[in-house]
Amino acid sequence: MNPRHLRLGVNIDHVATIRNARGGPHPDPVRAAHIAEEAGADGITAHLREDRRHITDRDIERLRREIKLPLNLEMAATDEMLAIALKHKPHAACLVPEKREERTTEGGLDVAGGHNHLQPYVAALNLAGIRVSMFIEPDPRQIDASRALGAPVVELHTGAYCHAALEAPGEARRQLARLVAAVEYTARIDLECHAGHGLTFDTVGPVAAIPGIAELNIGHFLIGEAVFGGLNSAVRRMRALMDKARAESSGARSA
C-alpha cells in the first residue's frame, strides 16, 4: 500500500444504536460494514461496551466471520473485554476509557496514571497478535506512557479540535497545532499514529493533511449523514475529502 495513503476506519456503532432503539434485526451493522467497504473504507471499528448499548457480542461474532476488512475492536481494559478479544482475535484492539453514564467516549485514556492496571491487558493482547492502540489526548506524557506499555499505536482524540472548530476558530487553531505536535512526537519515538472523534466533512481536512497520521476512525457523523444521503455516499465523500487533503499536503511539502 502507498505509505502516503491515509486509511479510513468506519465505526458502525450507531447503526446498532438505531437497531437497538426498537429491537429486531434492522438496521444491520454488518450490512453497514459491507457498504463501507464498497465505498472505500480500509477497516471497520466497533466498540463493545460493558452495557451493550449498541454493538453486541453477536455483532462481533458476525463481523469477524463475514467481513474481509480488518476489524478494530474498541474496548475497555476489563477482564470481560479481554476474554472476548482473545476469543475473536480482531486485527486490532483500541483501549478506551469507558463510563456507563457517558453518552460517548469523553476524552482520552489516562495511560500515564493507569500503567499498572493497563499493563497486563496490553501484554495479553500483544501476545495474542492483536495490534494494540491507546486512545489518548495529544499529550506527550500520554504518548510516552503508551510506548512504555508496549503499545505500537496511539489514537489521538480529536474532539477538542472538532468542538472548537464549530465556534472558536482561534482555539481550533491551537488544538490543531497541538495535534500536529503530538503526531510529530509519535514519529520521533517510532509509534504509529491514528486519530478520531467528532470528525466531520468540515473538520476532517486539516487533520487528514497531517502527514504522520496513518488512519482516521470516523463513525457517528457518517451514520448521521447516511440518514439523508446513504452510507455509501457519506463514506465516499469522506474518503474523497481525506484523499484531497493528503494529496494537497504532500504536494505542498514537495514544492
Image (tube, rainbow, N blue to C red):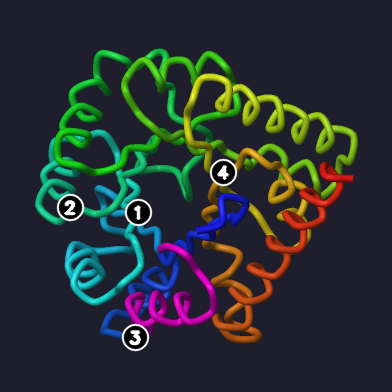
Which-is-in-front pick, marks 1 and 3?
1
Does label 1 or label 4 sit earlier along the sequence? 1
The residue at which mark 1 appears reads as: 72
Task: Give the prevailing secondary structure in the magenta stretch.
Answer: helix
The residue at which mark 3 appears reads as: 26
Q: Residue at x 18, y 23 (%)?
A: 120
Amino acid type at circle 4 is Ala
Amino acid type at circle 3 is His
Secondary structure under the numbered disc 4 in the rendered image:
strand
Query: Dot 1, how many residues are within 10 Å of its Cα: few (below 14), some (14-19), or many (20+)?
Result: many
Q: Position of residue 125 (x, y in %)?
A: 20, 37
Q: Is residue 28 above or below residue 201?
A: below
State left or right for residue 246 relative to residue 254.
Answer: left
Does label 4 or label 2 sit earlier along the sequence? 2
The residue at which mark 2 appears reads as: 89
The region drawn magenta spans: 26-43
